Structures are given as structure tokens and as C-alpha cells.
Image: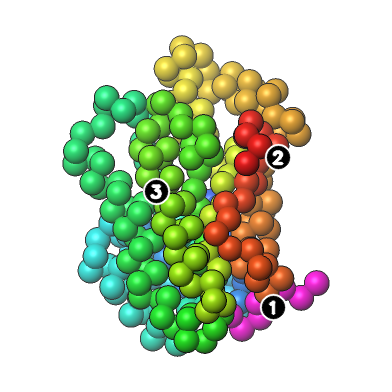
């Protein structure tokens, strides 16, 4: 099936490794030109070269600290100058530390609000007008299963990523008539370093090993396994495709049935 992505231009945030990198590769495999961005310059350059050689598309790389206004502005200028516009925007950043509500101070709330929420808003403010003018665009944001489960020991993720969903839904209503869709992804347990570090944190609290935590999690999964980055990326690419033109304002679970909610 032709997903209609050949020649589209994508900005993929947090794309040096993990799910962001998987999404960048998935879009490139469908013929989209890609801008990779994260804080790790050496890794980005290596990934950009590999993706360009593997898929024969244009790939640019630029470092960016998503919590800083001036770096977001530099990212937008770089992207528009190198690619001439953005058709697909994937909002993605590192996850916050696992903390109880009582453990989070005001400065930490502000820092992570800037990183999770304002980075998506700032980049969108720089790319959205071009999408609307062209009558085609995809804005997709990575969230967390914590928006549905509200994990007590992960209050930053539960709160701020839910805010991202609310913003996405509101924006989707505004721009739907312009051919721009706005959606969110809700990952289950995906095999990444982030999940491994989460297992370590849970194990420390429970007084067991990370291997014990992983085994318990897998035993509770309907499919009996964790998901892969490739499976997550496939879902993202589908939502960015031409075939997904009537899907907007949605939050799609990619969890192998793990999250125990109907919606």
C-alpha cells in the first residue's frame, strides 16, 4: 500500500534513539525527507548518515534543547531553510523522573512543563501555518500510558502528558478543515532504555530486581511480551499517512492490549 508519504517533509523530535529514531526511520522508509533533532549531536549525525544511505532520502540533523526558546527558534529556522517547509511533525521528548506528587517542587514542575508541553506548542507555532496553507499536515505527539492509569509514582508524566492530549484535541478541532490532523500515541511497554530504567526504579522501591519486575510485567501482558520500537513506529507512520486523513483528535493505544481501559 502506498501511504502517500513520498516527498513529504518530517520533523522528528527526540530522534537520536528509541521511539523517535524508530519513527524517523519509518517515515524515511516511506520516502519522506527527515530532520532529526535531539541533544546528542554525534549520535544524530551518525543516524542521519545511516538513514540517508539506507533509504535514499534527504536527512538533516540539528541539536536542540527543547526546553529553551532560542533553541526551538533555531530548530524551526533550520528546518524551514533546509527542507522548505514541514508536512509532518512528531512531538517527542525524554520522560520525566519517576516521583510522587509530594516529591516534586515548583522548579521541577516548570522545567518539565517547558520540556513536554511548551516544546510541542513552540514548534507547532512555527510549522502549522505552512501546513494550513498547503492544505495538508500531520501533527503527532508521543504521550504515555500514565495518562490513562495516573501512576502515583510518576505524577509528572501523568499530569503533563494529559495536558498534551488536551491541547492536541483542541488544536485538532481548529485545523481539521485545513487538512491537518492532530493525534497522540499512547505506548504500552515498549522495549526501550526508558522502560528498562523504569523497571530499575520500580525494583528499588519494591526491594526486588529489575529482572523480577520485567518478568512480572510480561506475565501480565495479554500477548506475553513487550512491544518493539518497530511496532510503535508502524503505528506512527500509519497516522501520518494519507490513508489516515479522517483520523484526528484521537489518542491511539499501541500496547498489545496491556492498558486495562476500554478507551
**For this rendering, which residue is in front, 260 or 1?**
260
Mark nearest the camera among 2 and 3 is 3
**Mark 2 highlights which residue?**
256
Q: Distance between the residues labelled 1 and 3?
A: 31 Å
Q: What stretch is highlighted in magenta?
A: 1-10
- Answer whether residue 175 is magenta in the image: no
Residue at (24% x, 61% y) in the render? 68
Specify few, some or many for label 1: CA neighbours under 10 Å numbering under 14, 14-19, or 20 or more: some
Relative to residue 156, is residue 150 drawn left or right? Answer: right
Specify few, some or many for label 2: CA neighbours under 10 Å numbering under 14, 14-19, or 20 or more: some
Quadrant where the N terminus sits is bottom right
Q: How far apart are marks 2 and 1 (CA)?
A: 27 Å
Residue farthest toward the top in the current orientation of the protein: 207
Q: Is residue 234 visible in the rendered structure shown here?
A: yes
The image quadrant that residue 30 belongs to is: bottom right
**Mark 1 highlights which residue?**
4
**Chain-order first, disc 2 or disc 1:** 1
The image quadrant that residue 167 belongs to is: bottom left
Specify few, some or many for label 3: CA neighbours under 10 Å numbering under 14, 14-19, or 20 or more: some
Is residue 80 placed above or below 188 in the rendered structure? below
Residue at (74% x, 31% y) in the render? 222
The image quadrant that residue 27 belongs to is: bottom right
Residue at (49% x, 66% y) in the render? 173
x, y (%) of residue 241? 66, 70
Give me the disc on residue 90: none
Is residue 129 placed above or below 50 in the rendered structure? below
Q: How far apart are marks 2 and 3 (CA)?
A: 24 Å
**Chain-order first, disc 2 or disc 3:** 3
Amino acid at each position: 500500500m502506498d501511504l502517500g508519504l513520498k516527498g513529504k517533509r518530517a520533523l522528528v523530535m527526540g530522534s537520536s534513539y528509541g521511539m523517535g529514531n524508530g519513527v524517523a526511520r519509518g517515515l524515511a522508509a516511506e520516502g519522506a525527507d527527515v530532520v532529526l533533532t535531539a541533544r546528542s549531536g554525534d549520535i544524530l549525525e551518525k543516524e542521519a548518515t545511516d538513514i540517508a544511505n539506507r533509504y535514499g532520502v534527504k536527512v538533516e540533523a540539528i541539536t536542540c534543547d527543547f526546553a529553551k526558546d532560542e533553541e526551538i527558534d533555531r530548530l524551526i529556522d533550520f528546518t524551514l531553510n533546509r527542507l522548505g517547509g514541514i508536512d509532518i511533525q512528531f512531538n517527542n521528548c525524554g520522560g520525566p523522573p519517576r516521583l510522587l506528587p509530594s516529591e516534586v517542587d515548583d522548579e521541577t514542575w516548570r522545567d518539565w512543563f517547558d520540556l513536554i508541553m511548551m516544546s510541542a506548542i513552540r514548534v507547532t507555532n512555527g510549522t502549522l501555518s505552512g501546513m494550513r496553507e498547503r492544505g495538508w499536515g500531520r501533527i503527532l505527539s508521543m504521550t504515555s500510558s500514565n495518562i490513562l492509569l495516573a501512576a502515583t509514582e510518576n505524577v509528572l508524566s501523568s499530569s503533563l502528558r494529559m495536558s498534551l492530549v488536551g491541547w492536541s484535541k483542541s488544536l485538532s478541532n481548529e485545523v481539521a478543515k485545513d487538512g491537518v490532523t492532530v493525534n497522540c500515541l499512547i505506548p504500552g511497554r515498549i522495549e526501550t532504555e526508558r522502560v528498562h530504567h523504569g523497571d530499575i526504579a520500580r525494583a528499588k522501591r519494591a526491594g526486588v530486581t529489575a529482572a523480577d519486575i520485567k518478568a512480572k510485567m510480561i506475565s501480565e501482558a495479554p500477548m506475553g511480551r513487550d512491544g518493539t520500537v518497530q511496532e510503535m513506529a508502524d503505528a506512527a507512520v500509519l497516522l501520518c499517512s494519507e490513508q489516515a486523513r479522517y483520523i484526528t483528535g484521537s489518542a491511539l493505544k499501541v500496547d498489545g492490549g496491556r492498558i486495562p481501559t476500554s478507551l
